Structure formats: C-alpha cells, structure tokens
Image: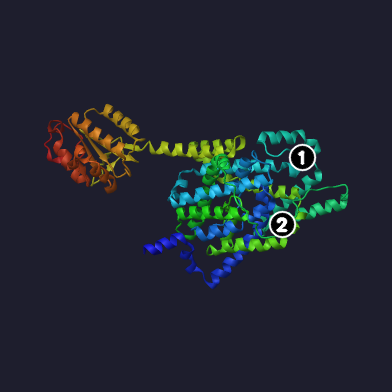
C-alpha cells in the first residue's frame, strides 16, 4: 500500500492512465489538436508581451505542457505561457537587458529555472494549501492592471509610431502624446480591422478560433493596403518568419549575481503562477467532480518549468484560455494536454514561415482583445458592491500594478490578503448565550431580550483561540464583566473553537484563576477532542480542573448549579434553568 502511494505520487499519471480507452483517446486527440491550433497565435502574442522572440512563446507551450500534464493532478489543466506571467517577466527583466536580446533570453531561462525549483520545493514540502491565503481580489486587481499595461505596450505597433521600450505607464502615454503627429493611419486601420473581426467572430461564431481568423483578416488587409498604395510607398512592419524547427536545447545561467538579482521576482512570479494554476485547476475540478491534489500540482508546475528551461521555454503556468478550451473541446484525461504540446511542435514546423506575413499592427489588435478579456467586470462589480476590505485589496493591487514594479504589486496584494486574514482570525466572535425558555429543551441562543442568570455568564467563542486573538477575547469578556459584575461563574461553549495554541491555553488558565479569585469558576463545555488534548499534553488541565470540562450541556449546568449561591437564587425571578424548579420561591 505504501509502495503504491509512493509510486502514485512519484508517477501521478499512473492514477489516471487506467481511465484511457479508445474513446477517451480519440476525444483527447481532437481536444489536443484544437488546443495546439489556438496556441499558435497565443504563443506569439504572449512572447511579444514578455519581450521574448516570438518563437519562444511557442516553445513554452510544448515541452512544459507535456511535463505539467504528466506530473500534475488536474485532468484538464493546460500549462504554457500566459498573459500575467509574460507581463511580470517583461517588467522584471527589461530593466536588466534589452528585450529580445541574447542576454534577455538567458535571464528569462534562468528565472524560469528558479521559479521551477521554488515550485518543486513547495510541492515536496506539502505547501499546496498556501495559495488559499491569497485573496481572489489580488488576482482580479492584478489582471485588470496588467490588461492596461499590455494595451499600453502595444500602442506603438497599433499606431505605427516609434516609442522607447520599457518605462512606466505614464511615460508610455506621454511618449504617445508627443508622437501623435507621426501616427500611421494604415497601421491603425489594420489593428482596428483585426480587432473588429475578432469581436465579430467571438460574437457570432464562438466555436471558431477567433485569434487565427482575425490574424488572417489583418494580414489580408495589410496586403490590400500595400497593393492599393504601393509597396514602395507603404511599409508595414511584420512579426517576421519564425524558425520552423524543434525547440533548441538551452540552459539557465545560475550565477550568484543572477540569483541575487532575480530572487525577488522569482518568488513573486512563483506565488502568482501557482495561484493562477491551482485556481484554474480547482474551477475545472469542481465541474468534473475530480479531487485535486494541490501539492502534486505544485510539483507538476515546478517540473514543467525546470524541464522547460532546457527546451527554450520561459515561465509557464496554467492557462485559463487553453484549459477552458481543453475542457469544452471534450478532453477526458491529461493525455489531451500531452497531445496539445506534441501537436504544437508539428504545427510549428509546418506554419512558422508564414509569420513573415503577419503585421505587427494585427498582432497589436489581437493583444488589445486579450487585454480586454482580462477585465473580469463581473467579479470587479461584485467585489465593489459586497466587501469594502476586498475592494481595498483589489484597488490597491490594481494601482500598484500600474505605477509600481509588478513583483512589488504582487507582494503588496499578497501582504494585504494576509493582513485581512489575520485580522479576521484575530477577532473571533464572542457571543453571549442564554437558555431559550420558549423551547422545551431550552437550547442556548443569542437573544438580548431574554433574561440571564445573575450568577452565571454563558458565552460562545467562534474561532481559534491563539496568541493573536487573546486580546480581543479578553476585551470582550471585560465588557461583559463590567456590565454584570455579579456573574462570577463563566461557562464557555467551546464547540466553535477549532484550535488553541499555548498562549490560548495559558489565557484560559489565567482566566480560571481570575474567576476563582472572584468566588466563581471557569467551565468549558463541548470542547473538541483534538483541542482538549493540548491541556493534557502541556499539563494545563490541572490548573483549569478536569472536573470543569464537560461533554454535555445537561451535565455542565447541573454541576454549575450546585455551586451557585442559593441565597441569590431564592429571590431570583429569572429561573432560566430547569434546575431552578427545585428551589422554593422566596
């Protein structure tokens, strides 16, 4: 059994391989072919965003996609270059080397190796749940900001003007303003025709690969303009022919200087890439009923980048567009993603030379469509309407993406998410509870209109009782103590407490001592077994008293009732406990 679990973890494709049949093989092959066709324009577009030579966007969708499918856990996730990873890579590396240069490519491969190693180590260390602490608002805000940056970076191709590469958003916009008189109307027309054709195809023929069709339309428009005006009078820059060859072997340059320089962006890229991949995988797993292994997904993503950097691939992660298309095309197993990566190699060998006829303006139009698709207007509206704190996180990440370095924007968003999480967990609900006399069993309820026992305070704590929450709980108890100083006995309904650390246990010990000094006591009811074990292991049980921990409400109230001052009980008119019936009314 242990050997089986080990082999399944080391070779996860052994788990889904028995599901492969003749029918699933055919469905996966068709889905893989569809994915490979769509990856052609996307790969070129993403490489352009990343500042890499166009063919590297195709290379990143070949071997990395195959490795991630074989060693991940998702049935439908397809890895490769993505918009977010590309824009982060460009922002981080363009300040160190000229985009597209040999030095730039070398840094990109080195960054890819570093990201892969971090991902692999996190997966092996079983840290797959860490991405759960990154708010979805960070992703929404970052992608919206990245969309604007992508569109701004393509203005020079869309308008047919010469602009300096790199720079912040405001610098790019100012440069466009100063070069406005140099706009090439033919280039802008080609970009608009490409955009409009893509929008129309998505609207009326959604099953068609709109990117490929709109690229063809833009190329035809450029050819017509050149024929009408004359090639000697009109020059329209093109992407250029791509190498029609297999991905060349490559290697990262892991020097101490490069590691120190790229470490911050490597960590930021890792966090964002893993969040993106696991989020996409989980959304697809929810539709198919698959149980996803987040740790295995980390391992698969890490291996895909480690292996990919030796086959000229830059940072790859889960692609939402290709994964969703893979699912909609009828993929049944990860074999579809394997086919997509393999068939992409064949397609590149056949069609790469035709990229010489693809105008830069048409590619800019396609990237404008990509940028528009990144605006998640539905979630943006929902976040703004429902949650102020999440709106702050989204807005802050959005503005940081536009005006700061992208890796810092990601770290800032993650930091705000963690602050929000810690703020919530450090403020557990402390509710005052009373028996409901209107019910036969007199269940505990929170109703301030019902009377309380003048000697016993009943509260319920919902949340973890750890070092960060102690001060909040103590303040709440002090408020209750000031309002009803006669309640010297305190019963804590503990069913909502999932975790107590050492500081929390010591707090309960001090609280028990304080209640005894007042002439009362501290009692715990319905505490979970795993939580209660801490008291036994650390010998806190002797200070609280094992006789003061109860499994049932009836037992707890019966014991506490015996300890109440009967002289106070006599004239009491509340009589909220069943045990109160045994006392004569004075």
Determine the CA span between mark 1 and mark 2: 26 Å
Crowding around mark 2 (Cα neighbors within 10 Å: few <14, some 14 to 19, many 20+) is some
Q: Is residue 381 visible?
A: no
Outermost front residue: 255
**Who's the residue at 70% across and 53% down the image?**
198
**In the drawing, does residue 360 fall left or right of residue 306?**
right
Dot 1, how many residues are within 10 Å of its Cα: few (below 14), some (14-19), or many (20+)? some
Residue 517 visible, this orientation: yes
The residue drawn where x is 70% and y is 39% is: 165
Pick the quarter of the image with the N terminus.
bottom left
Label 2: which secondary element:
loop
> Residue 346 location in percent, x, y?
66, 64
Question: Outermost residue, bottom direction?
Answer: 22
x and y, in percent, of residue 106 in the image: 63, 47
User: Left or right: 183 with respect to 48?
Assistant: right
Q: Which mark is residue 105?
A: none
Check residue 162 in the rendering and tell me which mark sits there, or answer none: 1
Q: How many marks?
A: 2
Mark 1 lies on a secondary structure that is loop
Identify which residue, 14 or 426, lies in the foreground.
Answer: 14
Mark 1 vs 2, N-terminal side: 1
Which residue lies at the image location 55% right of the left edge and 71% below the top edge? 23
User: Horizontal and vertical percent for residue 122?
Assistant: 46, 49
Q: Position of residue 45 (x, y in %)?
A: 67, 50
219 versus 486 height, above or below: below
Q: In the image, is 288 to the left or to the right of 185?
A: left
Tag 2 residue: 243
Query: Looking at the image, which is closer to me, 188 or 252?
Result: 252
């Amino acid at each position: 059994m242990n050997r089986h679990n080990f082999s399944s973890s080391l070779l996860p494709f052994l788990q889904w391989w028995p599901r492969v049949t003749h029918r699933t093989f055919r469905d996966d092959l068709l889905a893989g072919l569809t994915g490979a066709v769509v990856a052609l324009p996307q790969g070129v577009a993403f490489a352009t965003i990343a500042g890499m030579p166009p063919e590297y966007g195709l290379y990143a969708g070949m071997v990395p996609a195959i490795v991630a499918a074989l060693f991940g856990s998702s049935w439908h996730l397809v890895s490769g270059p993505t918009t977010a990873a590309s824009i982060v890579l460009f922002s981080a590396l363009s300040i160190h080397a000229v985009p597209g240069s040999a030095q730039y490519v070398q840094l990109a491969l080195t960054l890819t190796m570093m990201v892969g190693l971090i991902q692999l180590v996190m997966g092996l260390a079983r840290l797959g749940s860490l991405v759960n602490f990154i708010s979805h608002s960070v992703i929404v805000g970052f992608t919206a900001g990245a969309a604007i940056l992508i569109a701004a970076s393509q203005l020079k191709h869309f308008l047919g003007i010469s602009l300096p590469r790199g720079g912040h958003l405001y610098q790019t916009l100012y440069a466009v303003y100063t070069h406005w008189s140099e706009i090439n109307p033919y280039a802008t027309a080609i970009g608009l025709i490409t955009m409009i054709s893509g929008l129309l195809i998505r609207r009326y023929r959604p099953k068609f690969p709109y990117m490929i069709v709109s690229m063809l339309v833009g190329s035809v428009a450029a050819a017509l303009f050149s024929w009408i005006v004359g090639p000697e009078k009109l020059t329209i820059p093109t992407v250029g022919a791509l190498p029609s060859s297999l991905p060349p072997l490559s290697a990262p340059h892991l020097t101490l200087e490069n590691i120190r320089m790229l470490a911050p962006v490597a960590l930021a890229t890792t966090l964002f890439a893993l969040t993106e991949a696991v989020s996409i995988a989980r959304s697809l797993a929810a539709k198919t009923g698959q149980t996803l292994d987040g740790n295995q997904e980390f391992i698969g993503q890490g291996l895909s980048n480690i292996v990919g950097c030796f086959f000229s691939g830059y940072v790859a992660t889960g692609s939402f567009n290709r994964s969703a298309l893979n699912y909609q095309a009828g993929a049944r197993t990860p074999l579809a993603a394997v086919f997509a990566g393999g068939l992409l190699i064949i397609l590149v060998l056949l069609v790469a030379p035709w990229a010489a006829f693809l105008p830069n303006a048409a590619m800019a139009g396609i990237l404008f469509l990509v940028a528009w698709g990144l605006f998640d207007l539905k979630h943006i509206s929902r976040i703004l309407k429902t949650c102020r704190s999440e709106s702050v996180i989204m807005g802050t990440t959005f503005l940081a993406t536009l005006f700061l370095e992208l890796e810092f924007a990601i770290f800032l968003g993650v930091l705000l998410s963690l602050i929000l999480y810690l703020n919530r967990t450090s403020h557990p609900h402390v509710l005052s509870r009373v028996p409901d006399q209107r019910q036969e069993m007199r269940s505990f309820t929170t109703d301030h209109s019902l009377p309380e026992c003048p000697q016993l305070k009943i509260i319920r704590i919902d949340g973890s009782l750890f070092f960060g929450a102690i001060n909040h709980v103590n303040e709440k108890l002090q408020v209750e103590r000031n309002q009803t100083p006669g309640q010297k006995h305190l019963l804590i309904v503990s069913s909502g407490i999932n975790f107590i650390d050492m500081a929390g246990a010591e707090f309960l010990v001090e609280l028990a001592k304080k209640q005894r000094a007042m002439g009362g006591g501290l009692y715990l009811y319905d505490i979970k077994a795993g939580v209660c074990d801490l008291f036994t292991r650390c010998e806190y049980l002797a200070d609280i008293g094992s006789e003061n921990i109860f499994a049932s409400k009836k037992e707890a109230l019966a014991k506490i009732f015996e300890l109440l001052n009967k002289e106070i009980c006599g004239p009491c008119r509340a009589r909220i406990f069943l045990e109160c019936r045994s006392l004569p009314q004075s």
